[in-house]
Amino acid sequence: MPNVAAISSTTLTSAIGAGDNTFAVGSITGISKGNIIVIRNEAMKVQVAPALGQVQVLRGWSGTFARAQPAGALVYFGAPDAFKAAKDSLTALVGDSSSFPDYLLPGQRATDGAGNEYILTDLTVPCFSGTTVQIAMDGTFQATPVVGGGQGPVGLTVEEGTSSQFAWAQIYGFNSYAQDSTVTSAATSASVALAATSVSTPNVGLAVGAVSSVGQFYIYNMFITGVATSTTTSASSATGVAVPVFLNYPYTLSYRGDVSSL
């Protein structure tokens, strides 16, 4: 799939109504006439060069609808081609994407023909295909490799990317291969998915282990379904060992769980 450059963003300084064509943002740096602005599910087109912290736009662009938008909402902006790249990446992932919006932002979900579900994330560090990531719950959908003590939803990246890119992460379905930071070549379906307790090289998040009566940082609803494979061996992008998993909207909690809680 094509790598997708992260789209620049700022925030709304104050709430706007559906009929407001001029409004203030936290920063106008990088915003140009002709840019597309997307706030939640509404696209807009910048009409004149911004000045004094204000942007003037045509609301409800490209078939979207003008809506009231709250103060502090993320304001994504860029050239039309920047948004098109995200749509192209979705087509590469699930096939025909004509039923999805033209302006895809982190948080957009998609399902492929096999029923596997994905979410678009905003990477905060370099990640590789098969990295187990924690997804931020604050509406930014930023993703970083899981580590013990983290809390919230989890996904499995299906493409490589850097901290300046968006990437799709799988959150439901079969046939996903997760890289194992512990390089546990003996991993089987009897093993459990745990969050790594420290940063690995490469940083891939997952630490395969055995169920123990001692507290462990479980990745709940991420199930190892078979034996480990060593087919991926590039030291720069893989641990050398990956495990097949089934994902059912996995998540982590900030405390250690005991075997009695499973």
Image (tube, rainbow, N blue to C red):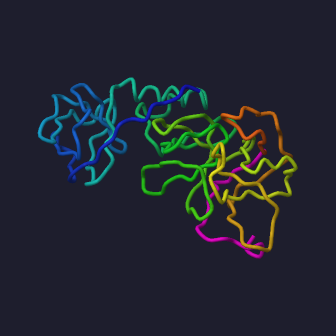
Left or right of residue 256, residue 90 in this image: left
Q: How many numbered tags mark residues here?
A: 0
Left or right of residue 28, residue 176 in this image: right
> Is residue 260 shown in magenta?
yes
Residue at image location 33% in from the left, 47% down from the top: 74
Residue at image location 72% in from the left, 72% down from the top: 215
- Measuring from the top left, give residue 257's x and y in whole percent: 69, 71
Q: Nearer the viewer, residue 88 or 125?
A: 125
Q: In the rendered view, would you say 137 is above or below 2?
A: below
- Measuring from the top left, give residue 90's x and y in whole percent: 54, 31
Asked where in the image residue 48 lies, by quadrant, the reply is top left
> Is residue 252 shown in magenta?
yes
Q: In the rendered view, would you say 199 is above or below 110?
A: below
Magenta residue span: 244-262
Residue at image location 42% in from the left, 53% down from the top: 139
Q: In the rendered view, would you say 90 is above or below 149?
A: above
Residue at image location 27% in from the left, 36% down from the top: 60
Left or right of residue 23, residue 186 in this image: right
The C terminus sits in image quarter: bottom right
Q: Nearer the viewer, residue 91 or 235?
A: 235
Asked where in the image residue 249 lies, by quadrant, the reply is bottom right
- Measuring from the top left, give residue 50's x and y in whole percent: 16, 34
